[in-house]
Image: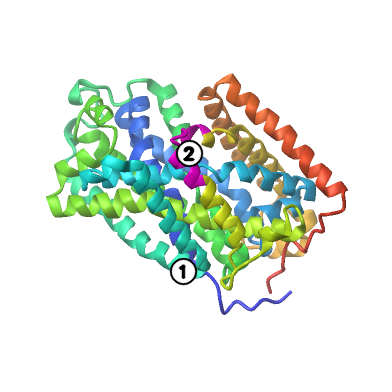
Amino acid sequence: MANNQSQGLGFMDLMSIAVGQIIGAGVMVMSISALGMTGRAVNVAFMIAAVFTVFSTIPTIFVASVAKFPGGAYSQTAVFVTPIYAGFTQYIGLLGSVSLGMFAIGLVSYLGMLIPAINNNQMMWSVIFLTVFFILNYFGTQWMARVQGFMFYFLVAALIMFTVMGLPKVEWGGYFGNELFGEAFMPRGISGLLEASAFLTYATGGATVIMAFSGEAKNPTKDIPLVCVISTVTVAFLYGLMATVIGGILPAGEVLAIGNLAPIADLIMPKPLYYFFIIGGAGFALGTTLNSSIATANPPMLRAAQDGWFPGIIAKTNKYGVPVTWLFLRYAINAAVLLSGFDVDTLGKWTLVIGNVTGLIGVLATGRIGKLFPEQWKKSPYHVSNGVMWLLLGGATVTLLIQAWMNLQGLTMGVIMLNVISFVVFYGLATYMYKTGKVHMNPSYELVE
C-alpha cells in the first residue's frame, strides 16, 4: 500500500523524541546509584549496558524495517502475537500511565535548587508542570515534536558542557588504579560491575518508544531502526564520559551523599553555566521524558479504541488527531495522584514484572517475521539469516531476563502478587471482550513502497 509521506515526523524529530526518552532520571540519578555498586568503573558499566540495550532494540529494528504500524507496539503485537494479547497489553498500559507524576516531581526538585521558593509547594508546581505538558500534547504530534526538538538541543548542549568542563578536572593520575581517594577502581569486582551494568540498562533504554510514531513518520522503515541504534549508542557513550566526571573529581562517598549532579556541576562550572545546566540539562532531561511519555501512549490507545477494546468516546479525536478523552483522563488521574500525595514510585512498580513478561513474548514473536512478511523481510536492509536472527534475539532475551531479575530484587511479595493478579484479570478481560464480538480489528499495518 502506497503512503503519502510528505507530512509527518522526520529523522531529527524521531531522534529528539528517542534521546529525550532515554535521557531522564537515568544519568541524573541512576548513574550515582551505579557508582555505589561499582565505584569509578561506572563508566565501563555504561558501555556494557549499552551493548545489552542495543540487543534489546533489535526486535524493534527488525519489525520497523518491514512495514508501518499505525498503533505502534499495540499493532505490532496484534500482528506478531494475537489480537487478544494486543488488547491485554493496552489494558495493562492503563496501569502504567498513572506514574507520569514522577517526572514532574523530579523536574521540580531540580528547579528548586535555583528557585528555593518552589520547594515550599512542590506538589503544586509538579501539577503545574504536568498540566503544561499535557496542554502541549493536546495540539498534536507536530507541536509536541517541535517543543521536544527545542529542549533536545539545549539538553544535549548542557550534558556535553558538563562533560567537556568536567573531564579536565578528573584525577586522571590514579583513576584506573586502586589508590585514588583511597578507593579501588572496581571495589566489588566483576559482580559489582555486572550488577551496575544490568541496572544501567534502564538508563540507556527508551529509544524503542518511537515505534509508537510508526504511523506518523515520513520514512518509518528507514528512520525508526536507525534512530533506535544511533540514539542508544550515542547517549550511552556520552553517559560513559559523564560517569567518568562523576567518579573522578570527588570521592564516591561524597557523591553518593550528595545524591545528584548539581553540586558537581557547581564545582566545575561558573554560575551562569551552572544555571544553564540545571535548566537545560537536569530540567529538560526530565521535561523531554515527560513530554514523550505523554505522546507515545496516544497512537496505541487511539488504535485500540478504534478496534473496540475501549468505549467509543476514547477514540474521539480533536482536529489535531489527538484522542482528547484519553488525554484528559490520563491528566486527571496523574494530577489526582500528585495532589493526594500517593507514592508515585509504588504505582510505577505495579506492572514491572508484567512489562518484562510482555517484552519477552514480543522478542520471541519477532522470530515469525520471515513467515509474516516474507518479501519485505528479504528486502529489508537489516535482513539476516535465521540462525543469526535467533542469536540476536537470544541476546535481547538475556537482556530482558537480567532486567526481570533486577526488578524482582526490588519488589516485595505483595507487589509481585499484584503483578500476577493484574496479569490474570486483564488477560481475562481481553479474552472476554474479544469473544463478545465487540472488538473488530482494523488492519494493523501498512506496507511501504
Assess whether mark 1 and mark 2 are in contact (beta carbons under 8 angstroms): no
Q: Picture coordinates of residue 73 (x, y %)? A: 65, 53
Instruction: Tell me the SS state at disc 2.
Output: helix
Q: Please indicate whether residue 47 sits to the left or right of residue 420 in the image.
A: left
Q: Nearer the viewer, residue 423 or 246?
A: 423
Amino acid type of the residue tagged 2 in the rendering = Thr
Q: Is residue 392 visible?
A: no
> What element does badge 1 sit on?
helix
Give how far apart the Cα atoms at labels 2 and 1 are: 30 Å
Provide the residue span drawn in magenta: 334-346
Q: Amino acid at mark 1?
A: Trp
Pointer 2 or 1: first along the chain: 1
Query: Where residue 126 appears, x then y in whole percent?
Result: 38, 46
* Colour mapping used in the image: rainbow
Q: Which residue is mark 1?
A: 143
Q: Which mark is residue 201?
A: 2
Q: Is residue 347 magenta?
A: no
The quarter of the picture where residue 176 lies is top left
